[in-house]
Image (cartoon, rainbow, N blue to C red):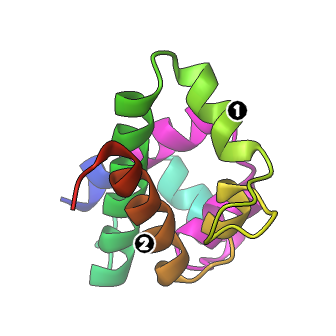
Amino acid sequence: MSAPALKLFFKASALWGLTVDQKRAVLGDVSRQTEHNWRNGDATTLTRDQLERISLVLGILKGLRLIFVEDQAGIRWLKAENRDHPFNGRSPLERMTDGGIADLYDVRRYLDAWRGVR
């Protein structure tokens, strides 16, 4: 399950234009070497935390695609300053890259609530 999860994560991060440091933060502050190895397809077994983080990223991607007709509109929302709670003037992407798994959950819950999903 780790290899397909990483492949999907790196596709999503490429779509969003994430930097190496942003990808590392979302994955739980992995080292540059680890991110590089994973990006290049080196086989690994991800931890439960890492799989959960990737699952949240994919859920965020799905939520954006259900809310916005075009990927670019979702990407603009993801990167734009947002005064709503829980962003408090930061972009959802900044919240996601704070490094805590709770930050990923908050963005996912926000999108789910926006869609009317409980």
Residue 26 in which image quadrant: bottom right
Indicate the amino acid at tag 2: Tyr
Relative to residue 46, is residue 3 depicted above or below? above
Magenta stretch: give its range.
8-34
Residue topped by disc 2 = 105
Verify whether residue 57 appears in magenta. Answer: no
Indicate the amino acid at tag 1: Arg
Total numbered badges shown on the rendered structure: 2
Q: How far apart are the two marked residues, 2 and 1, measured between alpha carbons?
A: 20 Å
Residue 76 circle label: 1
Residue depicted at 67% across the width and 56% down the height? 93
Q: 52 left or right of 106? A: left
Residue depicted at 61% across the width and 72% down the height? 86
Residue 43 circle label: none
Residue depicted at 41% across the width and 31% down the height? 67
Residue 11 locus on image (x, y percent): 47, 36
Q: 33 left or right of 112? A: right
Q: Is residue 112 visible?
A: yes
Residue 10 locus on image (x, y percent): 49, 44
Looking at the figure, which quarter contains the C terminus?
bottom left
Neighbor class of circle 2 (other Cα within 10 Å; few <14, some 14-19, many 20+) is some
Q: Is residue 43 visible?
A: no
Residue 99 locus on image (x, y percent): 62, 79
Label 2: state its secondary structure: helix
Residue depicted at 54% across the width and 59% down the height? 37
Residue 16 in which image quadrant: top right
User: Which is more toward the observer, 39 or 95?
Assistant: 95
Label 1: state its secondary structure: helix
Relative to residue 55, is residue 15 depicted above or below? above
